[in-house]
Image (cartoon, grey):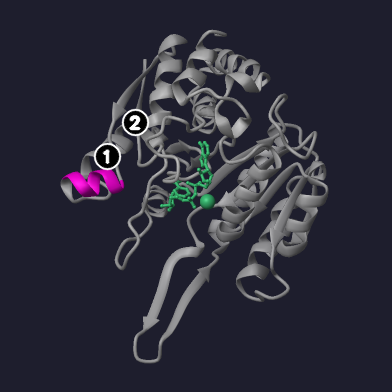
Amino acid sequence: MTQVTLIPGDGIGPEITEAVKAIFAAANVPVTWEEENAGQTTFDSIGELIPATLIASLEKNKVALKGPITTPVGKGFKSINVQLRQMFDLYSNVRPAKTTKGVNSRYENVNLVLFRENTEGLYAGLEMWDERLQISDSIARITRTGSEKIIRAAFEYAKKHGCKKVTVAHKANILKSAGALFLKVAGEIAKDYPEIQMEDKIIDNMCMQLVMKPEQFDVVVTTNLFGDILSDLCAGLVGGLGVVAGANIGDNMAIFEAVHGSAPDIAGKGIANPTALLRSAIMMLHHIDLKDEANRIEKALEATLANSAECTGDLGGKASTMEFAQNIIAKL
Ligand code: NAI
Ligand code: MG
């Protein structure tokens, strides 16, 4: 049995984590959950956004499945997601976007994996505010070490999975300092992978290319803010936020979570799509070497997605979150 930390999260988080738990139980996955929450829920109950018990659990288990978290808006609240990623140096945010049979989208044959730098860039937390002059600065910190780690992770992934091309998305033409460093490091690392083609695309053109011809991309690597935006864009290419998974991976820990947030507009209604979190959980199973379980659940999921009537409303069906989960369970 592998023990995994489970963070239900806020909004639709508890609903979709229940669905994943039910599917794992039905598939007899040898995983036990250690449930520890964070975010709005723990803030309201015990006044803490990231309780010490959660940190202890993560340090012990080193693997977690996480629902989305609402960061209370207001002064002094740093994003909990950003904090967790920085605290444990989870520098790779890996987000696959793949066309799925039966899932409605404008495109066919999209199959790319986005590597988003997860700890620095504009999300480094270097923010200054001059009350008198009413001037605010948010500094995009790019480091050589940070860039090397995410770019190497992207190339290593490409090598392992036989991908032919790594695209570096950047704005080095304007961001002469931070953007240029990221691009320069990419060029250096690419030399270690002669079998893989590296191309670079300026971020604005990258967005246009993704919308016009997303099939051309394989592995994409970029800095934190661009990666955040591109991940939702890529979700839109393959059926929306309800279906795309993600992983925050460091050298010593990994936290798996969907790309989407807590979806307050549909929370509590039992209609959220559990696919994105389930796919994140499948990535987690690969990470802890439970490949057979991962493949079995994935097959049942794909078979369910192929028939939109068995899915939630965002995919054109009428099923509730739990009915969708039961439809998957029936195919295990
Ligand atoms: P969101 O991703 O929560 O929702 C955007 C849209 O997609 C909404 O219309 C929502 O209903 C829909 N959607 C998202 N997930 C869905 C699912 N599983 N099934 C069906 N529809 C789904 O983004 P939003 O509304 O901008 O952010 C809400 C909150 O989530 C904010 O507090 C934000 O900070 C937080 N957030 C947390 C993240 C995390 O914990 N990793 C990531 C992104 C946002
Ligand atoms: Mg985002």
Observer-nearest residue: 235 or 93?
Answer: 235
- Judged from this view, the residue extending furthest toward the front is 318
Q: Is residue 42 magenta?
A: yes
Q: Amino acid at mark 1?
A: Leu
**Contact (CB < 8 A) between labels 1 and 2?**
yes
| Residue 128 seen in render | yes
Residue named by callout 1: 54
Q: Secondary structure at mark 2?
A: strand
Tell which circle, 1 or 2, labels the residue nearer the N-terminal end. Answer: 2
Q: Is residue 321 above or below residue 108?
A: above
Quarter residue 170 falls in: bottom right
Measuring from the top left, give residue 188's x and y in whole percent.
Answer: 71, 58
- Span of residues in magenta: 39-45
Q: Label 2: few (<14), some or many (≥20) within 10 Å?
A: many
Question: Which residue appears at 62% of the width and 31% of the height?
Answer: 315
Residue named by callout 2: 5
Measuring from the top left, give residue 79's x and y in whole percent.
Answer: 38, 56
**Overall secondary structure of the magenta stretch?**
helix
Q: Is residue 242 above or below residue 34?
A: below
Q: Is residue 76 above or below residue 264?
A: below
Measuring from the top left, give residue 96's x and y in whole percent.
Answer: 64, 38
Q: Label 1: few (<14), some or many (≥20) within 10 Å?
A: some
Question: Which residue appears at 59% of the width and 16% of the height?
Answer: 295
Question: Which residue appears at 37% of the width and 15% of the height?
Answer: 1
Observer-nearest residue: 266 or 36?
Answer: 266
Observer-nearest residue: 151 or 306?
Answer: 306
Q: Amino acid at mark 2?
A: Thr
Would you say 277 lies left or right of 174 here?
left
Q: Is mark 2 within 8 Å of ligand 1?
A: no
